[in-house]
Amino acid sequence: MTRARLTAVMMALGLGLSACASVDTATRNIPLEQITTETAAPAPSFQLVGYDVSVPTTLKVSEANSYYPGGDIVWRGDAFGNRYEQVGAIFENAIEIGARPLEGALPVVVEIEVKRFHALTEKTRYSVGGIHSIEFVMTIRDPLTGAVVRGPREIKADLVGYGGSKALQAEARGLTQKYRITQHLAKVVRDEMSLATGWVKPQGGVTARIQPLSPVQAL
């Protein structure tokens, strides 16, 4: 897209937003978590044109099969292999599912840097269950200038991990760890790109049920 076309799009976006809401200048500096209906912040209108996912190799990978192993990356939803690449692929798929369908006015690039991806070990999954602990930083940029449009925002997107018979029953329906986490992250990305508040953690801070954005499949 040429700079002239992008400028025209941005001007059109500005006109559209001014027609539907009046935003106080101070609102721009309010953290997403503090935005309320009183601030009347407009929802963003983004269109995904690219993304970059970073899973730093400085993050420690643990393959220990214990209830709660140390490490930043704990992942058993794929065969043994390069966990950095596997986790990166999950986020890339989540971005495609969550953001690709958006048809907003402003083209953007999404950047994600993973800070923690601690899913369940075999021992935990087939007994007590637990929490998929996921943390990352998300930044939305202008694709031409690189200027930050939204963020960077540190996101803690924890998800309940099934255990015991519930985990087995879920897997039989195609609701694997990989599927549930991917769909959950897709919803987080979608909210960050389409809601004035961005993604909002549920009460208690842990999501219990996913809201699938694509059909069930054994990913």
Image (cartoon, rainbow, N blue to C red):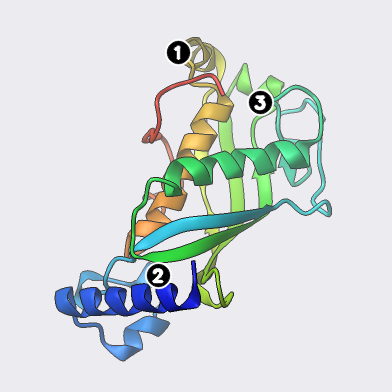
Rendering coords of residue 68 (x, y %): 71, 35
- Identify the secondary structure beneath mark 1: loop
Residue in the foreground of this view, choosing between 214 and 208? 214
Label 1 is placed on what type of residue? Arg
| Vertical position of residue 170 compared to residue 132: above or below | above
Rendering coords of residue 98 (x, y %): 44, 45
Label 2 is placed on what type of residue? Leu
Dot 1 alpha-carbon crowd within 10 angstroms: few under 14, some 14 to 19, many 20 or more: few
| Vertical position of residue 184 compared to residue 36: above or below | above
Residue of label 2: 32
- Identify the secondary structure beneath mark 3: loop
Residue in the foreground of this view, choosing between 15 and 41? 15
Rendering coords of residue 97 (x, y %): 46, 40
Task: Tell me the quadrant of the picture where the C terminus can be found.
Answer: top right
Left or right of 16, for residue 101: right
Residue displayed at 33% across by 83% down: 27
Residue of label 1: 173
Dot 2 alpha-carbon crowd within 10 angstroms: few under 14, some 14 to 19, many 20 or more: many
In space, the residues marked 1 and 3 are separated at their CA atoms by 15 Å
- Say whether residue 209 is visible: no
Left or right of 185, for residue 136: right
Residue of label 3: 77
